Amino acid sequence: MAGSPQSCVLLTHAKIFVSHSCALPESMQVSPSFRIKLLTLPFLFLAGCGGGGSTQTGPPPGFTLSISPGSLLVSQTTTSAPVTITATPAGGFLGNVAINVAGLPAGVTSSPSFPLSLAAGNSQQVTFTAGSSVPRANYTLNFSGTGGSASSSAVLTLTVSGAPITSATGNFKQQVIYQIVTDRFFDGDTTNDDPALSPGLFDSTHANFQAYWGGDFAGIQQQMAYLAGMGVTAIWISPPVDNIDKSTAAAGSPPSAPYHGYWAHDMMCLEEHFGDATNPCDWTAFDNMVTAAHQNGIRIIVDFAANDTNPYDAGEQGQLLNGGKPFASYINDPPAPGNFFHHNPTVTDFTDFYQLQYYTLDDLADLNQDHPAVDSYLKNAVLQFMNHKVDGFRLDAVKHVTWGWEYSLANVAFTASPTFLFGEWNQGGTSDPVYPASHKFANHSGIALLDFPLANAFRDVFGSPNGGDFHEIDSTLTTEANDFASPNDLVTFFDSHDLPRLLSVYNNQNRVNEALTLLLACRGIPVVLYGDEQYLHNDTNNGSQNGGDPYNRVWMSTFKTKSPAYSLINLMANLRQSNPALAYGNSMQRWINSDVYILERQFNSEVVLIAVNKSETTSYSITGLFTSLPPGSYSDYLNGLMGGFSVSVTNGGGNNPVTNFNLLPHTAAVWQSNAAATGPQAGSVGPLLGQSGVPVTIAGQGFGAATGKVMFGTTAAAINSWSDSTVSLTVPPVAPGSYQVQLVTSSGAKANTLPFTVLTGPLIPVTFTVNSVPVFSAGSTLYLTGNVVELGAGVVNTDAAIGPLLQPPNSNPATSWFIDASVPAGGTIQFQFAIIASDGTVTMEPGAPHPYTVPTSGVGSISVNW
Ligand code: NOJ
């Protein structure tokens, strides 16, 4: 029919167009390529065309706008994969469609840009590019198309994630950690649900809480947009190492499986339920997960248990493999000193330092880290994870591993690459008998700790109808600020896989929201337990607690992105990126009663003020509130999500009055001021200690783009990388000791100093034994001291010296004592023992110090007489 004028009848809505040339109204003009399609499908679009003018009824002309795929993940500083926008015509619609978009966040651009014109029936590919400071979030983009009187719309969920991670860091203070029990999160690969290597441990119905339920590394990878949209910047995964293949339950009982990951049988390989079903030593799924996380600005923290292997009394009886080969057998363990395991009773006295470190935790075969093969096995396992680009480690049960040995583990990790280590030192509050040992451990090992005292305070305050008293949180913050060298490195939480979820303790979602707001604003690096953002909980009593282990390890049954908690986490995680007061600032209580806590965080001129009223019923009139926020008006950073509102601040010469306000029950508000840095401000050094050659990260702001210097005394460190907020450097060859490290910009501006201890050299664990010690009075304790910084450099007090020394119960002879300490490899050190009385009086071991030449590698031991 081309070339011969014909008449055609087009149906559009209720109108009939009659055209002898078959020309189309402007809104229905088509592209040449589309005309060809029209010619091949005349019956669809050209009803009656050339056919004698009969009119048929049908759908009115229009089009449907569609977008494929309907969701998109794009990292800051990158360009997305394309989405395809299509205008599918119907009812003979033939025109152009003008397409516009609403909801595109500032800092995100598209190619091509909007509005754009699309001929009906055509498709257009569009990419999006996210700038470096677009908040991490899910954005709903509403596309509207109009053509003539027809219109259609389509929706795209655009998730902007963090910029791809290209380097390791020792600074985690800006992170928000999301804790995942891998088995309970998302089943991304059904081929590993019930592997032939370890069959029968899987329960697809999720009824048996002690079985595997299907979650895996692929599942975490597939939920990356959910995680990134929540704003979290790190995920802590349950131990991924290969666990025992057999149930520990009695024959005929439902299986009891190591779905949690804490029953390792090969730390050099991965659990087949989480990765490759047929080959536990295949790292592909793990690597893919790490790569996907890094692509989206999310760091990976691996939970690593160095204390023990698996139950000695069931399943595989504690045995340990090395890359699939036999390595250590608990039931055929050589006698001391060649023993791979300690064979001691179960810990019953959690205040006895010997029991804590050398007894058996629950029924888990307790590793002897001082055996040279065990020492290198554990360190190699950690290094292997670092080679697979893991960013940090949560060290399980650090209170129960040999403390002195752990210093050398940390040193090995810190020496290999910048990383962040935090340990599980389970304890009550700051009056716990082992609390002093916990901060001594953190301050000298460089291993940060999970903040159990603060977690318990949070649970007391938020976990009952009337709740506890905010003074408990406040005094915990004050005490820990005095005791920990780097309180901002403490890893904070209120829920964990070991505790009943807060909602099982007190089923009130407002309280979860309030606890989250405060947790994410508090000093320290916050951890959110998976599922808390969905208010998940299962309150089944486990025999001692409602919702206790394993009922707290719920299935992640929903991934909705609209809950208040999800939004709160998102806002506060973004605030931690944009306002350094949360990561680096100090803490100041500004107003308090049992129900209300108003906390201020300040780093130089950046300030965040957080107010929470946890009461169910009582409003409080807040008068006499002062702040460091500069004079001005502040809207609630949470946009009223938790009932917050604007406040005004007037000039008080730094201690600025806030206008009085009424804080209603269950309200949380956040006000913040984020002035640009006027000079270099250092907020973090990590790790806190290391020998010459160890990589160290200094973080803060205002460092400038051009490389400056970092001074250790008068010696400048080699700089590995430099940006306005993060500098990576290498500890220079300076004398061991304490330094106030100072960053100097390229233009000579000096930042505040930060303390750092330069160690003598790489650390080796050594067992020091001293015999014939005179009997000393109860209340006094025995310590190891020496001439190197690792042994206190001659300073003899209970903090600087190593100890107290230990004795097994009924030690024979009763005058022998020992302690494990990590000392510099290869050098000759001088050491000596000292008895320190409860009033601090020191009785030194008489005579000259003992010399000892430390092995260059492996482990050491030395025994001397007093
Ligand atoms: C503490 C862990 O958090 C817990 O879940 C585990 O069972 C024990 N350590 C033993 O590894």
Image (cartoon, rainbow, N blue to C red):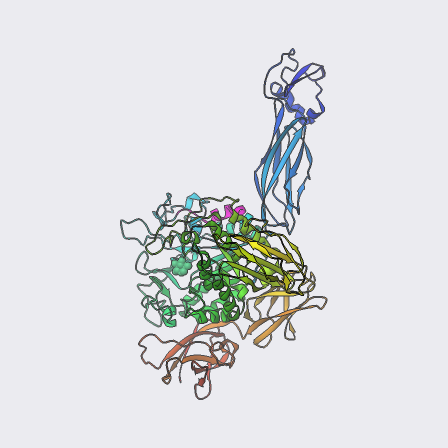
Q: Which residue is drawn at 43% across and 51% down?
A: 503
Name the image quarter holding the C terminus. Answer: bottom left
Q: Position of residue 373 (x, y in %)?
A: 41, 67
Is residue 175 at all visible to an observer of this figure? no
Q: In this view, does 582 lie above or below 189?
A: below
Q: In this view, does 436 lie to the left or right of 584?
A: left
Where does the magenta region start and end?
213-226
Question: Which of the image's four quarters has the N terminus?
Answer: top right
Residue 490 point in image, percent of width and height = 51, 63
Residue situated in front as seen by the camera: 560 or 241? 560
Among all residues in the image, which is located at the extreme bottom? 847
Residue 141 coordinates in the image, percent (x, y) = 61, 40
In the depicted view, which residue is nearer to us: 458 or 198?
Answer: 458
Residue at x 64% of width, y 37% of height? 125
**Figure check: 755 above or below 381:** below
Decide whether the magenta segment is chiefly helix, strand or loop. helix
Q: Is-magenta flag for residue 793? A: no
The one nearer the camera, 337 or 453, is 453
Q: Is residue 684 left or right of residue 196?
A: right
> In front: 324, or 80?
80
**Residue 30, located in which quarter of the rendered image?**
top right
Number of marks in picture: 0
Residue 644 seen from this side: yes
Task: Write down which quadrant ligand 1 falls in.
Answer: bottom left
- The answer to whether 664 appears left or right of 46 in the picture is left
Q: Please identify the residue farthest to the top as the structure is shown.
A: 52
| Position in image of residue 760 (x %, y %) | 54, 75
